[in-house]
């Protein structure tokens, strides 16, 4: 299917099904139940799942295949966002040109940074990329204020008049795809469940599926094999007469273009941009996504992005009042004790919970969530084989 082998085609099919049915899968609890707060099937969060999934997939192409760890990837996310917002302000509110411009500018920026940074490897490469990212943040925050909007950032305003979009005077234009607004949604009520189908989410989801498919083809291509050779032993590769630098630069550019795609989609979904997208913590976040999901795997970065964004948006909203509702069946003293114990791990303390999860994954699942799934699969596989062998033995007549 689409040039993929059987295993990759099966994985891609699973990702398509999960992505298209996300409004159902992410809303397992009825709206009026106490567990409804764990539902994640609302448009804003679903959009974040797929957009940051794209960001993590691109980062994984660089880090997972070549072994080059970039601590400055958020710079390309920010560059793509700024390019997209200016395209919307000046030319058209159609999201396609904005996204394309975000990809192009992020790719060019990635080429420039990669050309300089590729002269170093290991921790020196990481520090160089971090320095570039912080320089980009400083430029966006203060130096280039007329272009970036400084601390307040940029957004679509009523005074903007894109050349190819007709916006009534005094009104704020809205991002759209040939007239279909990103905020357009259809709600389906079934019993106690409410499912929301958002146009912006499905547009971002299609982009994520295309990005995921291209990453599979890249992983299985001769180019991908060369990148693995760089990660395995770059010095030995150079001794064979193969110059590894063009491959690492190409990987850096492709990875930056993925980040630009994510940045353009962020603007398409929410037409405002701020310099905080380029801060070093945003770069660290994508590193965590890749490690949590499984570095060098195909679907791992998407899983890691989903976990972090879920915790950021769901665990952070749990407060003491919700905890008291959960433990209301307990005696007052025990109820207060349980709330006291759990309190540091929720709300603003969700980073502590993330840190514990990250430590457990690194210690017990070095291959990330993908390794955990593989272990579970092997466990059930062994059980099925044992049952089949037992059944075969039972049917074999004794001599």
Image: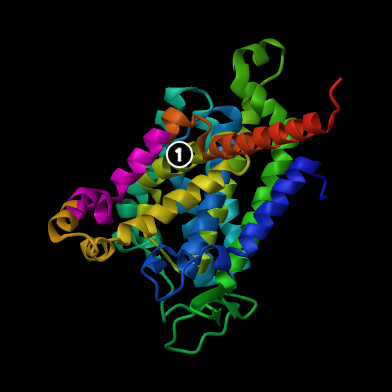
Residue 278 falls left or right of residue 327: right
Label 1 CA crowd tier, 10 Å (few <14, some 14–19, many 20+): many
Q: Secondary structure at mark 1?
A: helix
Q: Which residue lies at the image location 56% right of the left edge and 42% below the top edge?
A: 300
Predominant SS along the magenta part: helix
Is 380 located above or below residue 79 in the figure? Answer: above
Query: Does residue 193 belong to the magenta stretch?
Result: no
Residue 289 placed where, x, y %? 47, 43
Magenta stretch in the rendered image: 338-360
Is 245 located above or below residue 59 in the figure? Answer: above
Residue 14 seen from this side: yes
Q: Nearer the viewer, residue 91 or 315?
A: 315
**Residue found farthest to the front:** 399
Query: Does residue 357 belong to the magenta stretch?
Result: yes
Q: Nearer the viewer, residue 55 or 154?
A: 55
Q: Which residue lies at the image location 29% right of the left edge and 61% below the top edge?
A: 318
Residue 176 falls left or right of residue 127: right
Q: Quadrant of residue 31?
A: bottom left
Q: Quadrant of residue 233?
A: top right
Residue 14 falls left or right of residue 148: right
Residue 212 placed where, x, y %? 65, 49
Residue 137 placed where, x, y %? 36, 48
Residue 96 placed where, x, y %? 63, 66
Q: Which residue is mark 1?
A: 287
């Amino acid at each position: 299917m689409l040039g993929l082998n059987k295993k990759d085609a099966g994985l891609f099919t699973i990702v398509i099904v999960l992505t298209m049915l996300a409004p159902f899968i992410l809303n397992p609890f009825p709206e009026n139940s106490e567990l409804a707060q764990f539902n994640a099937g609302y448009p804003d969060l679903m959009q974040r799942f797929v957009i940051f999934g794209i960001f993590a997939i691109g980062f994984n192409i660089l880090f997972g295949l070549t072994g080059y760890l970039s601590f400055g990837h958020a710079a390309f996310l920010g560059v793509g966002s700024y390019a997209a917002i200016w395209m919307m302000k000046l030319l058209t509110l159609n999201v396609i040109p904005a996204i394309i411009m975000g990809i192009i500018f992020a790719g060019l920026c990635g080429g420039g940074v990669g050309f300089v940074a590729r002269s170093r490897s290991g921790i020196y490469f990481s520090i160089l990329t971090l320095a570039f990212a912080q320089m980009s943040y400083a430029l966006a925050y203060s130096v280039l204020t007329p272009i970036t909007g400084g601390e307040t950032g940029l957004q679509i305003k009523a005074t903007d008049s894109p050349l190819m979009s007709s916006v009534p005077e005094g009104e704020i234009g809205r991002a759209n795809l040939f007239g279909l607004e990103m905020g357009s949604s259809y709600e389906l009520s079934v019993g106690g469940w409410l499912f929301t189908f958002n146009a912006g989410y499905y547009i971002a989801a299609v982009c994520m599926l295309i990005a995921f498919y291209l990453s599979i083809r890249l992983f299985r291509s001769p180019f991908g094999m060369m990148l693995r050779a760089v990660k395995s032993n770059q010095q030995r590769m150079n001794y064979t007469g193969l110059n590894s630098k063009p491959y690492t630069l190409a990987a850096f550019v492709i990875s930056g273009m993925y980040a630009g795609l994510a940045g353009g989609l962020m603007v398409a979904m929410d037409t405002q941009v701020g310099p905080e997208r380029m801060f070093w913590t945003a770069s660290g976040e994508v590193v965590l996504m890749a490690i949590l999901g499984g570095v060098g795997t195909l679907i791992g970065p998407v899983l890691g992005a989903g976990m972090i964004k879920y915790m950021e948006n769901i665990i952070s909203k749990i407060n003491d009042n919700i905890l008291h509702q959960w433990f209301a069946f307990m005696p007052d003293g025990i109820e207060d004790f349980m709330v006291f114990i759990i309190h540091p791990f929720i709300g603003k303390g969700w980073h502590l919970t993330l840190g514990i999860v990250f430590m457990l994954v690194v210690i017990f699942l070095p291959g990330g969530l993908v390794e955990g799934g593989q272990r579970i699969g092997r466990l059930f596989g062994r059980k099925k084989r044992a049952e089949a062998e037992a059944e075969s033995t039972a049917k074999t007549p004794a001599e």
